[in-house]
Image (cartoon, coloured by chain):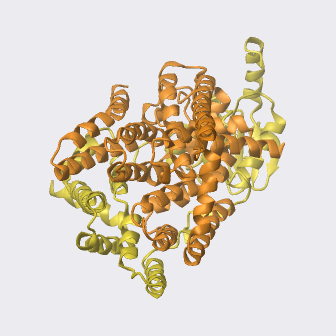
């Protein structure tokens, strides 16, 4: 039974998102296709799907919203995941025919292993130190607990969804029915955790407090690794040193209860932490990739992903949508000034459309 | 406007805490102004953070933030859009030389600086040794399990002391409570009739308590060992169910009877 639960957790939290992320990865240049990117893109897609199917369900379904959201989310996620695998398989057939490298999860992972093997002994030592530091944080997440007051809200909402079947229509403190709580209703990350808990059969609190940190901590570092890859393209050693120091910065980043670093460790599973440690850095990464990918001059895929990311951010918190939209516009303005062209600004405004729609629904309700 | 400006500055100060870690960020940022030649990096890690900071301390932004129905207490989250960790470490690593010795010495010095200027997160008073896989205290789990062993109704209504209140519905949302964490929100003038009788007095008047709990159809009352009552719960008509550590569970037979009657109309 435990093995089955563990396997379903791996399937839901690692395999499906990675499979979903494989499809957009084909638009990245060959040297940029990494397993980390597949998982990051997969999570962005998964959260966007959650918001895409979840918001109408929350607004329209009064009694059976939870069942609807599970079915719709799962069907769409599995569809995207298998589409990714299908494309990868097609590419494999073509690759065999033309005797060229094929594109798929297995080849990406094996290429990464080769890349590590080829790196200098110094870089390998830094890699091991980085891995140990991340492992340390994951072990601490398992050993420690933080009794955060907001859990009484978010976790109770998720547990209520599981046990009542309704979404954000019962007071999380008392259990009594009430009008839709629009302030929280569109931020569906707690419901994502409830879905994972329901499908795996693991209690929601175990999923939130013990399983999610094991996923979100490495996921956040994968993202930082991708961002720092843009800084140190010609020095593996400096790249890994950056990773060591960023780990240390986070571990010692508890200078106040407001920093993203504090949220990263004390409230890892909450949407706010996801916003500060995944969604907002992911926006930076997408802009870096957009502006530094010389093969993909139009950058359409990146702009699409910025739009998807803004929507995905809605799962973490409504504020996240506002912040990522505002930052997208700010970057758009700054790049428009630098490039002396309005292109970036117009594309930024277009990428903000899902966010604008989200905010409109939020305000009108 | 001047007041709002001071509020913005205070928020920034509270965000930085009383440590010097974010001063390292400022130093790194200043270094990047001079050293960063890549235009994309300059925009994302030098210019954009500066604009965000200017917007943040502008009183008008605070006013707009309030007007968009966002909680002003979360205004500090605008600062999350400045990637402090990335800026700090990027500036540091950029400083390292290209020799092995330069990198190692640089890394050791920077790691020490970060550790000295920062605050070790695992020393936080908000972190405790996990008592169980659920990562909540064991007492609420024991109390809920005991209630569940005694009552197989899908939903039950329970009054618990404040120390348990936050965890009960996270563990089992089929347990209803008369009030929740809102009563502790000092910013709101929220209170609850059951809370006023159960939590505030030094000695609980059980007659008064039962008057209000019956109004809210509370079937079970959990007392903490330290809570004093004017008469014993049994004398007030409550039925003893179980004791779990410092918590004693009682059932109100009047509400139990009422629920039995409801079952005729709403079976299950």
Which percent across, then down, holds residue B38?
28, 63
Q: Colour of chain A?
A: orange
Is residue A208 shown to the viewer in this render?
A: no
Q: Nearer the viewer, residue A248 or B176?
A: A248
Image quarter of the N terminus of chain A: top right
Relative placement, left or right, of B167 versus A320 is right
Q: Nearer the viewer, residue A154 or A6?
A: A6
Residue at the front extreme of this rendering: A98
Residue at the top extreme of this rendering: B265
Is residue B217 shown to the viewer in this render?
A: yes
Q: Nearer the viewer, residue B77 or A294?
A: A294
Question: In which quarter of the view is residue A66 placed?
Answer: top right
Which percent across, then down, holds residue B199?
58, 48
Residue under the point 27% across and 45% down: B65
Residue under the point 35% across and 78% down: B95
**Residue B32, relative to residue B230: is it above or below?**
below
Relative placement, left or right, of A48 versus B198 is left
Image quarter of the C terminus of chain A: top left
Residue under the point 36% across and 74% down: B94
**Residue B86, relative to residue B19: is it above or below?**
above
Which percent across, then down, holds residue A92?
62, 39
Question: In which quarter of the view is residue A77 placed?
Answer: top right
Looking at the image, how many numbered discs can be counted on the residues? Answer: 0
**Residue B204, relative to residue B21: is it above or below?**
above
Which percent across, then down, holds residue B216?
61, 30
Q: Colour of chain B?
A: yellow
């Amino acid at each position: 039974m435990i093995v089955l639960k563990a396997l379903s957790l791996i399937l839901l939290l690692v395999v499906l998102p990675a499979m979903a992320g494989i499809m957009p990865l084909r638009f990245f240049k060959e040297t940029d296709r990494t397993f980390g990117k597949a998982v990051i893109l997969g999570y962005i897609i998964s959260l966007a799907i959650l918001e895409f199917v979840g918001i109408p369900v929350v607004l329209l379904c009064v009694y059976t919203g939870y069942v609807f959201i599970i079915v719709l989310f799962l069907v769409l996620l599995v569809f995207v995941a298998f589409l990714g695998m299908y494309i990868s398989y097609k590419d494999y057939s073509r690759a065999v025919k033309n005797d060229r490298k094929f594109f798929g999860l297995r080849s990406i992972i094996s290429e990464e292993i080769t890349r590590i093997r080829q790196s200098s002994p110094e870089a390998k030592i830094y890699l091991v130190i980085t891995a140990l530091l991340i492992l340390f944080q994951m072990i601490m997440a398992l050993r420690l607990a933080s009794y955060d007051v907001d859990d009484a809200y978010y976790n109770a909402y998720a547990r209520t969804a599981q046990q009542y079947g309704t979404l954000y229509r019962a007071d999380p403190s008392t259990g009594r029915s009430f009008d839709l709580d629009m302030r929280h209703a569109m931020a569906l990350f707690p419901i994502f955790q409830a879905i994972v808990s329901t499908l795996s059969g693991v209690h929601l609190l175990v999923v939130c407090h013990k399983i999610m940190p094991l996923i979100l901590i490495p996921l956040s570092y994968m993202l930082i690794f991708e961002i720092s890859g843009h800084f140190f393209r010609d020095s593996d050693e400096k790249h890994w040193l950056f990773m060591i120091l960023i780990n240390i910065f986070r571990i010692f980043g508890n200078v106040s209860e407001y920093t993203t670093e504090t949220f990263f460790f004390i409230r890892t599973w909450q949407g706010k932490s996801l916003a500060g440690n995944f969604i907002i850095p992911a926006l930076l990464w997408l802009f870096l990739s957009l502006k530094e990918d010389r093969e993909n001059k139009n950058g359409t895929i990146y702009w699409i992903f910025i739009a998807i990311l803004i929507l995905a951010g809605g799962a973490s918190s409504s504020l996240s949508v506002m912040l990522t939209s505002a930052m997208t516009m700010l970057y758009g303005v700054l790049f428009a000034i630098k490039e002396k062209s309005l292109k970036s600004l117009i594309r930024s405004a277009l990428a903000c459309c899902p966010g604008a729609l989200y905010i409109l629904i939020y305000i009108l309700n | 406007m001047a007041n709002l400006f001071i509020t913005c500055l205070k928020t920034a100060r509270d965000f930085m805490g009383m440590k010097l870690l974010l001063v390292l960020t400022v130093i790194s940022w200043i270094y990047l102004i001079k050293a960063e030649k890549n235009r994309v990096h300059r925009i994302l890690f030098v210019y954009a953070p500066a604009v965000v900071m200017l917007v943040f301390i502008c009183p008008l932004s605070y006013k707009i933030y309030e007007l968009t129905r966002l909680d002003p207490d979360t205004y500090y989250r605008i600062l999350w859009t400045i990637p402090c960790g990335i800026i700090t470490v990027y500036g540091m690593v950029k400083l390292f030389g290209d020799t092995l010795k330069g990198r190692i010495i640089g890394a050791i010095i920077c790691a020490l600086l970060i550790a000295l200027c920062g605050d070790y997160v695992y020393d936080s008073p908000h972190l405790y040794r996990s008592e169980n896989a659920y990562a909540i205290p064991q007492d609420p789990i024991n109390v809920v399990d005991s209630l569940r062993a005694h009552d197989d109704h899908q939903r039950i209504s329970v009054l618990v002391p404040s120390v348990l209140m936050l965890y009960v519905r996270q563990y089992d949302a089929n347990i209803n409570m008369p009030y929740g964490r809102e009563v502790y929100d000092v910013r709101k003038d929220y209170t609850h009739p059951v809370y006023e009788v159960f939590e505030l007095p030094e000695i609980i008047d059980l007659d008064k308590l039962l008057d209000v709990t019956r109004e809210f159809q509370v079937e079970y009352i959990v007392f903490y060992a330290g809570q004093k009552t004017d008469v014993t719960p049994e004398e007030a008509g409550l039925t003893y169910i179980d004791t779990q550590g410092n918590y004693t569970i009682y059932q109100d037979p009047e509400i139990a009877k009422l629920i039995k009657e409801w079952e005729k109309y709403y079976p299950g």
